[in-house]
Image: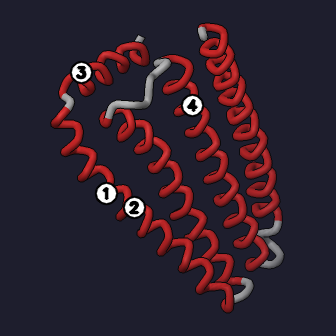
């Protein structure tokens, strides 16, 4: 069993590193796209705006990738947390939900700007992404509300989760 635990910790660490590398790659791509947008300022203004919006979207994806890497590394490698207590489930899920909701919101805004400049008929699609982010945020709030009641039934689980936080602060 210790072998499997070590294997999965190593696998999670490797995945965290891969997410960081992908984030760096996408950031470089966003910088190139942003630089190209600056180069086209004197020419076509619409093309420059589209490229700047594309760079923002790429940066949003890079940030999401980096946040996922941080969450995986902190939760699975550093803390070696056991996701069973209500407190731990809420905290773990909340870290991912922040990333997903922010990413969806940014992508929805980027999609809205792109649709306005390129194809206005795609505006309902961009709006549906923003609505999905709102529904996800609302569902997350309901989950936290119900989970808070479960946490009150297990105060020792809250203390155990707080003690795991000390590993991150070191």
Neighbourhood count class around disc 1 (C-alpha, 10 Å): few under 14, some 14–19, many 20 upward: few
Residue under the image location 59 percent in, 46 percent down: 64
Instruction: State which tag comes first along the sequence, 3 or 2.
Output: 2
**Secondary structure under badge 4?**
helix
Is tag 4's residue or tag 1's residue first in the polypeptide sequence? 4
Instruction: Check disc 2 and report its element: helix, strand or loop.
Output: helix
Viewer-proximal residue among 114 and 76: 76
Residue at horizontal 76%, vertical 61%?
Answer: 38
Q: Which dot, 3 or 4, sits closer to the camera?
A: 3
Q: Considering only vertical position in the picture, is 146 above or below 119?
A: above
Q: Is residue 130 above or below residue 57?
A: below
Q: Label 4: few (<14), some or many (≥20) within 10 Å?
A: many
Q: Is residue 154 left or right of residue 72?
A: left
Q: Which residue is mark 1?
A: 141
- Dot 3 surroundings within 10 Å: few (below 14), some, or many (20 or more)? few
Residue underneath mark 2: 137
Give yes or no for contact between labels 1 and 2 (Cβ–Cβ under 8 Å): yes
Mark 3–mark 1 Cα distance, whole angstroms, equals 23 Å
**Alpha carbon of mark 4 to alpha carbon of mark 2: how far?**
21 Å
Q: Is residue 170 above or below residue 45?
A: above
Residue position for label 3: 159
Q: Position of residue 125 (x, y in %)?
A: 62, 81
Q: Position of residue 145 (x, y in %)?
A: 24, 52
Q: Which mark is residue 72?
A: 4
Q: How many marks?
A: 4
- Quarter of the C terminus within the rendering: top left
């Amino acid at each position: 069993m210790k072998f499997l635990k070590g294997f999965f910790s190593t696998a999670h660490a490797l995945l965290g590193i891969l997410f960081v590398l992908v984030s760096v790659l996408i950031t470089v791509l966003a910088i190139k796209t942003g630089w190209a947008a600056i180069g086209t300022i004197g020419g076509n203004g619409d093309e420059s705006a589209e490229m700047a919006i594309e760079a923002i979207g790429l940066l949003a994806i890079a940030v999401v990738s980096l946040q996922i890497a941080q969450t995986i590394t902190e939760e699975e490698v550093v803390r070696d947390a056991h996701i069973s207590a209500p407190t731990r489930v809420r905290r773990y899920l909340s870290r991912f939900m922040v990333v997903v909701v922010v990413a969806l919101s940014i992508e929805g805004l980027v999609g809205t700007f792109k649709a306005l400049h390129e194809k206005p008929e795609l505006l309902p699609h961009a709006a549906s992404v923003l609505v999905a982010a709102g529904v996800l945020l609302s569902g997350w709030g309901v989950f936290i509300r119900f989970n808070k009641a479960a946490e009150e039934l297990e105060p020792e689980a809250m203390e155990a989760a707080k003690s795991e936080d000390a590993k991150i602060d070191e």
